[in-house]
Image: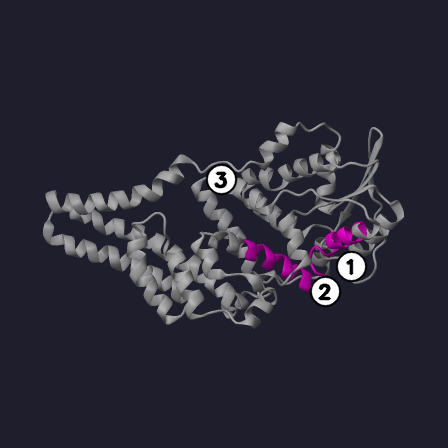
Amino acid sequence: MNVNEPRPPTPPVEISLGDRTVFLVGTAHISQDSVDTVRRTIAELSPDGVCVELDAQRLDALRDPSRWRNLNLGSALRQGKGTFLLANLALSSFQRRMGLHTGVQPGAELLAAVHAAEEQGVPVTLVDRPIRATLLRAWRHTGFFKKISLASTLLASAFESPELNEADLAELQEKDTLSAMLEEVGEALPAAKRILIDERDTYMAAKIRACSGARVVAVVGAGHVPGLTRELQREIPATEVAALDRIPPKPTISKVIPWLIPAVVVALFVGGFFFGDTSKLADAAWAWILANGVLAALGAAIALGHPLTIATAFVAAPLTSLNPTVGAGMVTGVVQAWAGKPRVDDLEHLLDDLGHWRGWWRNRVSRVLLVFFFSNLGSSVGTFVAFGWLKNLF
């Protein structure tokens, strides 16, 4: 069957919960058939409540795809939100590219469910866990080297441009594109799968069970239907749900290392002054400046940063590497946002540009975040390179 041909509708999975019935509607987030199925199902069943696999942030994004127009990049970077913005764009980019292959906006059927419920005056319950909480839980429960793998998977998903045949498209139309990306991460990091996939099934099942009404329609990605069918059969304690919502604190080592590195560097210079070869202090200082400055500037250049941004990276990185509260990327990102200020059309065409990896460099909004990322990466690598030179003080 051609992927563009109408598919026979899959009936909802009917689950009895005592005197209540939940109808699970499994959808594909890039399928017009799913949009039509959702509208028809809600109209035919006339439910007392509609649950949707969304959180407030994702619903706002679907209602207003141009929300990026109101973004103040400089302010967001100063508030330390650069990494979160980059992850958000990576997710948006992934879903946007999948949608381009079918001509359907990712999540259109979820928005259709919300609209259909509102038109009938039926309460809507957003049952998915916020994506920020999901990613942070995965990040905090992942070891250092696995974190590198997790970040690499997310970034690779943002930049890759897959060639899809009809079989690939048919498979994509059978699953939730957000879950598809998280499943990809889960395959690379099996230990994170429980947080990225299984926990969401439990979380959504608890929220669906808590939804009032004798007849409830739950619209979720098709990939979640088996897990939800299983989880809905059991009583889920409130304490378990609260635990799934909780973002674990940073590990002690993550809090210590940002302060430990500058402390060690300062100790090396002080020790070198009193006990080492003082003639090498100037060489060591230059080693620190050049390792941090050159690699941070190289990162800014790779991101096609403004010349002023590249110069700022060289000057700022040796200093920010000694200050755990300010990263090189925070400084270079703010400078890039000022020197290469995004135009109105950059904001209007942001998601369109992210449909291809070249668009990340072409669009001035995403370029700011690339400057943030690559200059931070360069400065971090430079810090470890400089350590190799500083040991020669003794």
Of helix, strand and loop, which one carries label 1? helix
The quarter of the picture where the C terminus appears is top left
Above or below, 169 against 17 in this view is below
Q: Residue 140's mark?
A: 3
Decide which of 14, 245 is in the foreground and name it: 245
Report how far apart the C-alphas of labels 2 and 1 lie in the structure. Answer: 9 Å
Q: Residue at x 23, y 51 (%)?
A: 389
Q: Amino acid at mark 2?
A: Gly
Of helix, strand and loop, which one carries label 3? helix
The quarter of the picture where the N terminus appears is bottom right
* Magenta residues, start to end: 88-117
Which quarter of the picture shows residue 218?
top right
Report how far apart the C-alphas of labels 3 and 1 lie in the structure. Answer: 37 Å
On the rendered structure, is 214 left or right of 277? right
Q: Residue 103's mark?
A: 2
Of helix, strand and loop, which one carries label 2? loop
Q: Amino acid at mark 3?
A: Arg
How many residues crowd mark 2 within 10 Å: few (<14), some (14–19), many (20+)?
Answer: few
Answer with mark 3 or mark 1, whichever residue precedes in sequence: 1
Q: Residue at x 38, y 37 (%)?
A: 253
Q: Amino acid at mark 1?
A: Gln
Residue 170 position, x and y percent, is 74, 56
What residue sits right under mark 1 in the picture?
Answer: 32
* 103 part of magenta stretch: yes
How many residues crowd mark 3 within 10 Å: few (<14), some (14–19), many (20+)?
Answer: some
